[in-house]
Amino acid sequence: MFFEELQQGMTRTLLPVTVEREEMLDFAKKYDNVPLHTDEAAAAKTPFGRLLAPGVLSFLLVWAKYLEQDFFGEQLLAGTSTTIEWLRLVFAEDVLTGTAQVTKLQERSPRSGLATLELRAFNQNGEHVLTGTVCAVIKRKNT
């Protein structure tokens, strides 16, 4: 969608995604190699009692589902920032669902605008596990 076609409040419901144990371990060993994410014996000794999914992986799994129904499509020119707020723990085999909502639109130039997108993810129990906020540069019509 072009910047002019976006509306504040536009929302998409994201399809569920399962945090697959092996994918979680592979990601953690490569990008977040701490015992809480990679060592079952160490994780068992924590107050959580088991391995935790890396927060960035949780966000990326939800982000991938968003991209399947992306608001911006080919009009996305660039991202400018992403912030992630982790609210609850995520474990292997949790099922995450969520919403994506355009929360802010700002004119930037004759060629582009800025769109802020908020992703909210929930686990299979309906508990809010994370919020990700992404700001993107979106192409305008007639440029």
Image (tube, rainbow, N blue to C red):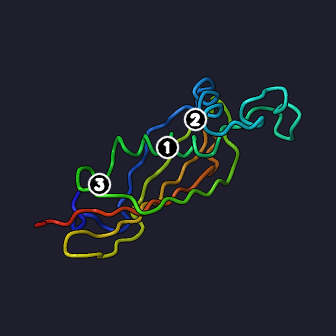
- Give the side of residue 22 with respect to residue 2, left or right: right
Is residue 62 shown above or below 7?
above
Q: Which residue is rendered at x = 28% and y = 62% of the image? A: 138
Is residue 103 shown above or below 22?
below
Label 1: which secondary element: helix
Among the 4 quarters of the image, the one containing residue 58: top right
Among the 4 quarters of the image, the one containing residue 37: top right
- Residue 26 image point, x, y percent: 60, 27
- Give the side of residue 64 with respect to residue 38, left or right: left
| Label 3 CA crowd tier, 10 Å (few <14, some 14–19, many 20+) | some
| Dot 1 amino acid type | Val
According to the image, label 1 marks what residue? Answer: 62
* Circle 1 or circle 2, nearest the eye: 1
Q: Which residue is rendered at x = 28% and y = 56% of the image? A: 76
- Residue 95 image point, x, y percent: 57, 35
Nearest to the observer: residue 73 or residue 111: 111
| Label 1 CA crowd tier, 10 Å (few <14, some 14–19, many 20+) | many
Nearest to the observer: residue 77 or residue 66: 77
- Residue 113 image point, x, y percent: 29, 70
| Label 2 CA crowd tier, 10 Å (few <14, some 14–19, many 20+) | some
Label 2: which secondary element: strand
Dot 2 or dot 3, earlier in sequence: 3
Q: Which residue is rendered at x = 33% and y = 45% of the image? A: 69
Q: For marks 1 and 3, give the CA distance.
A: 16 Å
Dot 1 or dot 2, earlier in sequence: 1
Q: For marks 2 and 3, give the CA distance.
A: 26 Å
Please identify the quadrant where the C terminus is shown. bottom left
According to the image, label 2 marks what residue? Answer: 95
Q: Which mark is residue 72?
A: 3
